[in-house]
Image (cartoon, rainbow, N blue to C red):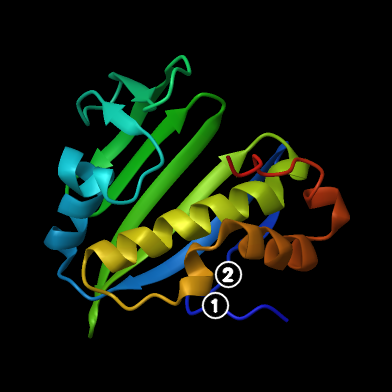
Amino acid sequence: MHSTDLTPATFGPAGDRWLLKYVVDLPVSRWDAWIAVTTRDGLGAWFPARVLGEWTPGRELTFAFDDDDEPTYGEVVDVDSGRQLAFTWDTDSLRLSLEEYDAGTRLTFAASIGSRGRGARDGAGWHACLAALRESVGGYVEDADKDTGRLFALYAERFGPEASTERPPAPE
């Protein structure tokens, strides 16, 4: 078995889509967590693309990468300041919910994806991103939580071969 510090995602059908769901404890207040998931500097520490746009429902978002790839687009679906953020990114839907608890803030991160075959690949990618988020706010993270190759193997084992048909990009 592959060991990580963060609890691995759950994965299952959600209507005609597939849902990855994570619960990550962050050692900061809900407002500090909100800053980490909504501001340019905060997102820059963990989100896999630069997010351009305003967090206003109905507004378009642009997701830009450092390489020459064309940007992708999405839309803000819902914002409850300090508590919840929902938006689309290309064909995926993402929802982040923040809840205070004794030692900080509990983040529930859900990614709705269109293909079961992306489960292990996206599971590994979001796991590593959420580890980077936790680390960016002062939380402890194991090296295994940032190793996408190892995480892909973990999620392929957990979710099965049908969820492992789309592989992560090869390292350059």
Mark 1 and mark 2: Cα distance apart in space:
8 Å
Above or below, 114 against 126 in this view is above
Specify the quadrant of the image occupied by residue 44: top left
Q: Residue 108: x, y in percent?
A: 41, 61
Q: Which mark is residue 29?
A: none
Q: Residue at x 28, y 75 (%)?
A: 139
Q: Which mark is residue 4?
A: 1
Is label 1 in a helix, a strand or a loop?
Answer: loop
Nearer to me, 21 or 36: 36
Whether pointer 1 and pointer 2 mark residues with C-beta atoms closer than 8 Å, the reply is yes
Residue positioned most to the right: 161
Looking at the image, residue 166 lies above or below residue 89: below
Point out the residue furthest to the front here.
172
Give the side of residue 135 with respect to residue 116, left or right: left
- Location of the N terminus by quadrant is bottom right
* Picture residue at 26% right of the left edge, 24% below the top: 52
Label 2 sits on a secondary structure element that is loop
Crowdedness near tag 1: few (<14), some (14–19) or many (≥20) residues, C-alpha within 10 Å: some
Left or right placement of residue 6 versus residue 172 in this view: left
Q: Is residue 107 visible?
A: yes
Instruction: Check disc 1 and give the amino acid type.
Output: Thr
Residue shown at 86% from the left, 55% from the top:
161
- Identify which amino acid the numbered label 2 is placed on: Pro
Residue 112 appears at what percent x and percent y? 57, 42
Disc 2 target residue: 8
> Which numbered mark, 1 or 2, is in the foreground of this view?
1
Left or right position of 85 against 55: right
Quadrant housing residue 129: bottom left
Instruction: Using the rendered image of the protein, determine whether residue 13 is visible from the camera's viewpoint.
Output: no
